[in-house]
Image: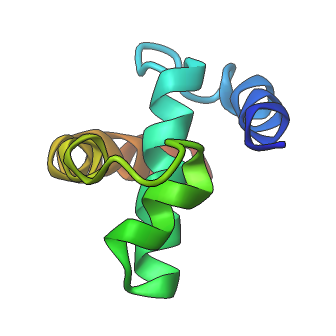
Amino acid sequence: MVYHVCCQIREKLEKKLKGIRVGLHSCRKFAVQRVVSITKGVFTASVWIGYGKGNLAMTEHYLNRLAQRQEQVNRRLGADMC
């Protein structure tokens, strides 16, 4: 289910975000961050995204590397809206 949601997100944003990665891997990283921000639990996000019993190291790796990418996306979307 997560895979199909990520595919839909990627397809809708592909044109607006030229030059920024919008592959499935990047969308998964974004999904991990959103789940953590909502549930306040890294383990919950790890299980939700599909790492079996919860691979905390990979989930934390996603969270640590995502801040810069998210800032780029926000700037690009903000520029398109103005």
Q: Quadrant of the C terminus?
A: bottom right
Quadrant of res 62: top left
Residue 1 in the image: above or below residue 53: above
Number of numbered discs overlaid on the protein picture: 0
Foreground residue, 30 or 40?
40
Tell me what residue is drawn at x 52 percent, y 16 percent: 18
User: Which x, y percent locates residue 16?
Assistant: 63, 29
Residue 22 in the image: above or below residue 75: above
Horizontally, residue 70 falls left or right of residue 15, namely: left
Foreground residue, 62 or 23?
62
Tell me what residue is drawn at x 56 percent, y 18 percent: 23
Horizontally, residue 27 falls left or right of residue 1, namely: left
Colour mode?
A: rainbow
Residue 48 in the image: above or below residue 5: below
Residue 70 in the image: above or below residue 16: below
Foreground residue, 23 or 15?
23
Furthest-front residue in this view: 53
Tell me what residue is drawn at x 57 percent, y 49 percent: 49
User: Which x, y percent locates residue 38?
Assistant: 51, 83
Horizontally, residue 80 falls left or right of residue 74, namely: right
User: Which x, y percent locates residue 61?
Assistant: 19, 42
User: In the rendered image, is residue 41 in sight?
Assistant: yes
Foreground residue, 23 or 50?
50
User: Which x, y percent locates residue 67?
Assistant: 21, 52
Tell me what residue is drawn at x 48 percent, y 71 percent: 44
Horizontally, residue 23 falls left or right of residue 30, namely: right
User: In the rendered image, is residue 22 in sight?
Assistant: no
Q: Quadrant of the N terminus?
A: top right
